[in-house]
């Protein structure tokens, strides 16, 4: 066939060979805003290395392969022995190795560790999201284990190691370890208090035998797991090692791997405990209280993961429209497309800015700042609710910016779209977060006071923000039907917090557009319906991944 009919023109080049960190203005400015100047140069250098790796063709190929060849369960060996192992594509291990070496499990051991980790999380998860699950759980397990100091002394150095050491061996023989968790059961879902897995105390102090079935166990090839089970005094938290210290496999039957919508590179399974050895973490009957800090950490990671996915989706959309021509010019120069891109960029920047503020609050809370701790109690579930819910419409609209090309797997956009609902479901779906905000408002007045102090710093700076705060206070003054209105209330809390941060720190074009559209209501129901008088070009230029 003649090649003359197959000349390729007007196709956008791949978005590769760029620094994911340096190209993200909201991220770089946020880091400069909050980080101690003495740490800034070192942290920038670390993130530049990671950002260039994340923007490389090699890393993007790792992400593609890890999803194209998902994990495979092997329940038995050739002789019929039960082994319960999961095989992964080599790209999975390369991704995890890079994430561990970049400190994504080491926040608790570094100055400003949560902010620095949040920045790295935002960068590296733009390559591939599935492998961030075990990294997130390993990170989040540390505060739960600290409730049992003898266990923390043994396990924390392993979990915060920057060495990825894969394989089922006793954790004492490894240079680093990863953690998973098994909380959910088929009859309970988010209602973990309905759990029926039983824990029988053994002769050794703190040791138990577990019996039960877990409906979702994340990362079942991890070295250890946090598990909720019912002991004599009630629901209790336990540490379940995958391999015992004598080298024997702990009873841990993986019944099947879940066939998921997205997050396909990551193994999620149903597991059966039958006399499985475990160590108690915290007191009997205090399981939920023991894991509460872990839950807060993973919820913040949900915010970070959604913000990262939105950033990558918007970067891909702007990159495509910068190169693609239609109707006599570049798509990015068309007023209506500029409106869409600017609207998407606003959502992305607001998510990133809020996520970095929460990471900074965590560092300050760990340093003893009680006001920051109180702010986190309200702001984390509100941000988890709102940012994760905005992720799917952003991914879908960004895909549409690429037209039919975006609907094709090779573009990478379908993977982003399939991944986008996950963080809204993980660690408690929308209603769980909304009800948690209500509990904070009703039981912990310091949390709402900290929120008011936070948004009060911008009082008088923007009339639409002031009006939104006033409306929120009016809404809170009426407790009639408060549960049924919880989603509406939490949405307003999150938007007011985002608006306050953007008014303080973002360029005037960004803050004005956000307040006009998200707080002032001058916007339609779809993306691309911003008031035409706003500075679209300036907003899009700020979000452009490559000049």
Image (cartoon, rainbow, N blue to C red):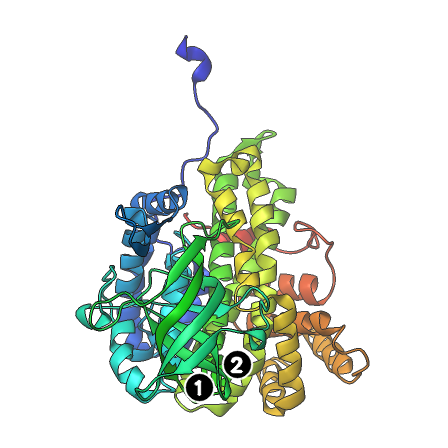
- The residue positioned 44% from the left and 17% from the top of the image is 6
What is the x, y in percent for residue 540? Answer: 54, 52
The residue at the point 28 percent across, 58 percent down is 98
Q: How far apart are marks 1 and 2 (CA)?
A: 9 Å
Closer to the camera in the image, 116 or 232: 232
Check disc 2: other Cα within 10 Å, few if <14, some if 14-19, many if 20+.
Answer: many
Graded by Cα atoms within 10 Å as few (under 14), some (14 to 19) or many (20 or more), the crowding at tag 1 reads some
Residue 455 in the figure: left or right of residue 94: right
Give the residue drawn at x 74%, y 60%: 522
Mark 2 highlights which residue? 376
Q: In which quarter of the image is residue 383?
A: bottom right
Give residue 387's quadrant in the image: bottom right
Whichever of labels 1 and 2 marks the residue nearer the N terminus, that label is: 1
Mark 1–mark 2 contact, CB under 8 Å? yes
Secondary structure of residue under mark 1? helix
Say which residue label 1 marks.
365
């Amino acid at each position: 066939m003649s090649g003359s009919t197959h000349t390729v023109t007007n196709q956008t080049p791949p978005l590769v060979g760029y620094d994911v960190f340096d190209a993200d203005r909201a991220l770089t400015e946020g880091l400069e805003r909050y980080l101690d100047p003495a740490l800034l140069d070192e942290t920038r250098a670390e993130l530049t290395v990671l950002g260039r790796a994340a923007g490389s063709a090699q890393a993007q190929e790792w992400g593609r392969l890890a999803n194209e060849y998902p994990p495979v369960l092997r329940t038995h060996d050739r002789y019929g022995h039960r082994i319960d192992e999961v095989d992964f594509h080599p790209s999975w291990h390369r991704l995890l190795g890079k994430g561990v070496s970049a400190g994504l499990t080491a926040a608790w051991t570094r100055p400003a560790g949560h902010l620095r980790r949040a920045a790295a999380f935002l960068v590296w998860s733009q390559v591939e999201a599935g492998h961030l699950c075990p990294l997130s759980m390993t990170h989040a397990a540390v505060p739960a284990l600290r409730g049992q100091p003898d266990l923390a002394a043994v396990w924390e150095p392993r979990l915060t190691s920057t060495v990825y050491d894969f394989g089922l061996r006793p954790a004492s023989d490894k240079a680093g370890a990863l953690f998973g968790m098994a909380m959910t059961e088929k009859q309970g879902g988010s209602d973990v208090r309905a759990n029926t897995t039983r824990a029988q105390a053994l002769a050794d102090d703190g040791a138990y035998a577990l019996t039960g079935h877990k409906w979702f166990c994340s990362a079942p090839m991890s070295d250890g797991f946090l598990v909720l089970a019912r002991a004599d005094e009630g629901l209790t938290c336990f540490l379940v090692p995958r391999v015992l210290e004598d080298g024997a496999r702990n009873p841990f039957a993986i019944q099947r791997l879940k066939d998921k919508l997205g997050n396909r590179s990551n193994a999620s399974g149903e597991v059966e405990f039958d006399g499985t050895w475990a160590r108690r973490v915290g007191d009997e009957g205090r399981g939920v209280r023991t894991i509460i800090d872990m839950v807060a950490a993973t919820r913040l990671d949900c915010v970070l993961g959604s913000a990262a996915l939105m950033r990558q989706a918007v970067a891909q959309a702007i990159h495509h429209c910068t190169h693609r021509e239609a109707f006599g010019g570049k798509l990015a120069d068309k007023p209506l497309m500029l409106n869409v891109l600017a609207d998407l960029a606003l959502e992305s920047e607001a998510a990133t800015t809020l996520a970095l503020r929460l990471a900074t609050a965590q560092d300050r809370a760990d340093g003893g700042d009680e006001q920051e701790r109180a702010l986190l109690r309200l702001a984390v579930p509100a941000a988890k609710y709102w940012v994760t819910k905005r992720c799917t419409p952003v991914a879908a609209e960004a895909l549409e910016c690429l037209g039919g090309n975006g609907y094709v797997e090779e573009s990478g956009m379908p993977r982003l779209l399939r991944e986008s609902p996950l963080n809204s479901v993980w660690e408690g779906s929308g209603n769980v977060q909304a009800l948690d905000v209500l509990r904070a408002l009703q039981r912990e007045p310091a949390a709402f006071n900290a929120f008011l102090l936070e948004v009060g710093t911008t009082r008088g700076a923007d009339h639409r923000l002031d009006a939104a705060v006033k409306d929120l206070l009016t809404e809170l003054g009426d407790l009639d039907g408060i549960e049924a209105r919880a989603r509406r209330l939490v949405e307003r809390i999150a938007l007011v917090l985002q608006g306050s941060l953007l008014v303080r720190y973002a360029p005037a074009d960004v803050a004005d557009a956000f307040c006009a559209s998200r707080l002032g209501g001058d916007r339609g129901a779809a993306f691309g319906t911003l008031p035409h008088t706003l500075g679209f070009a300036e907003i899009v230029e700020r979000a452009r991944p490559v000049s």
